[in-house]
């Protein structure tokens, strides 16, 4: 039976740093699943910075979309999935035409992928540290893509939080236990 810790918070709230800390403190083998895509130089620099922060002995899997397919092969005791926000973004971008999201197919894909992810995790025995952004605390986005993204990620976050054994909300680098 897996143990799932879901870590969420705002941008730059310390989510990833906290997940890394928990994994390092476990002193167990770690697999890091990275979901980021480098769309520009700034994102490439962010990815390189995050890669440099990880211990050399950790296995890293770069999986912007097909996270579930790799889960059965993971042998480590601890798995960090960082982050759900970018994973959902990558799925959403497949449904964008002329700066508009085809909402119904995107939501169906996000829900199906989330259920597949949870089903795959349930078959493991690892400790899972899953990182995501909380995007529902701000104003309603003024554009359709932002609203659809917020709704999709909000649904995914609720689903992951429901299944998690522990939920941590990060505020200014301080972990607050929600569940």
Image (spheres, helix red, strand yellow):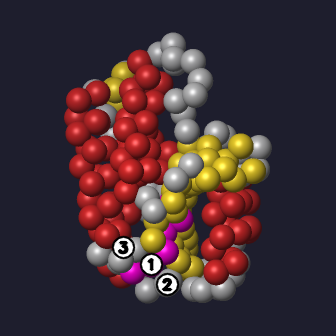
Give the residue furthest to the top. 142
Dot 2 alpha-carbon crowd within 10 angstroms: few under 14, some 14 to 19, many 20 or more: some
Answer whether residue 165 is visible to the viewer in this image: yes
Which contiguous range is marked in magenta?
A: 125-130
Q: Which element type, helix, strand or loop, lies under badge 2?
A: loop
Q: Position of residue 135 (x, y in %)?
A: 54, 33
The kind of secondary structure the magenta stretch mainly shows is strand
Magenta segment includes 47:
no
Q: CA distance from mark 3 to mark 2?
A: 11 Å
Residue with the mark numbered 3: 71
Residue drawn 27% across the image and 54% down it: 115
Pair 1/2: label in front: 1
The correct choice, above or below, for 110 with respect to 63 in the image is: above
Residue drawn 44% across the image and 78% down it: 126
Mark 1 or mark 3: whose residue is earlier in sequence: 3
The correct choice, above or below, for 82 with respect to 93 in the image is: below
Mark 3 or mark 2: whose residue is earlier in sequence: 3
Answer whether residue 41 is visible to the viewer in this image: no
Name the quadrant of the N terminus.
Answer: bottom left
Residue drawn 23% across the image and 39% down it: 108
Q: Are marks 1 and 3 in contact (CB under 8 Å)?
A: no
Q: CA distance from mark 1 to mark 3?
A: 10 Å
Residue with the mark numbered 1: 126
Using the image, tell me which numbered label, if any, was put on residue 76. Answer: 2
Residue drawn 22% across the image and 35% down it: 105
Residue situated in front as seen by the camera: 76 or 60:
76
Q: CA distance from mark 1 to mark 2?
A: 7 Å
Q: Which element type, helix, strand or loop, lies under badge 3?
A: helix
Mark 1 or mark 2: whose residue is earlier in sequence: 2
């Amino acid at each position: 039976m897996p143990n799932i810790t879901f870590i969420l918070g705002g941008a730059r709230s310390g989510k990833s740093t906290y997940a890394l800390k928990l994994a390092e403190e476990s002193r167990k083998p770690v697999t890091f699943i990275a979901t980021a895509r480098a769309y520009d130089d700034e994102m490439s620099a962010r990815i390189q910075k995050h890669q440099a922060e990880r211990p050399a002995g950790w296995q890293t899997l770069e999986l912007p979309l097909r996270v579930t397919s790799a889960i059965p092969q993971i042998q480590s005791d601890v798995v960090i999935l960082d982050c759900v926000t970018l994973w959902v973004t990558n799925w959403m971008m497949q449904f964008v035409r002329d700066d508009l999201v085809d909402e119904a197919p995107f939501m169906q894909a996000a829900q199906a992928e989330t259920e597949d992810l949870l089903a795959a995790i349930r078959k493991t025995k690892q400790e899972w540290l899953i990182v995501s952004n909380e995007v529902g605390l701000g104003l309603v986005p003024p554009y359709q893509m932002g609203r659809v993204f917020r709704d999709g990620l909000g649904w995914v976050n609720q689903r992951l939080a429901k299944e998690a054994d522990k939920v941590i909300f990060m505020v200014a680098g301080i972990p607050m236990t929600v569940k």
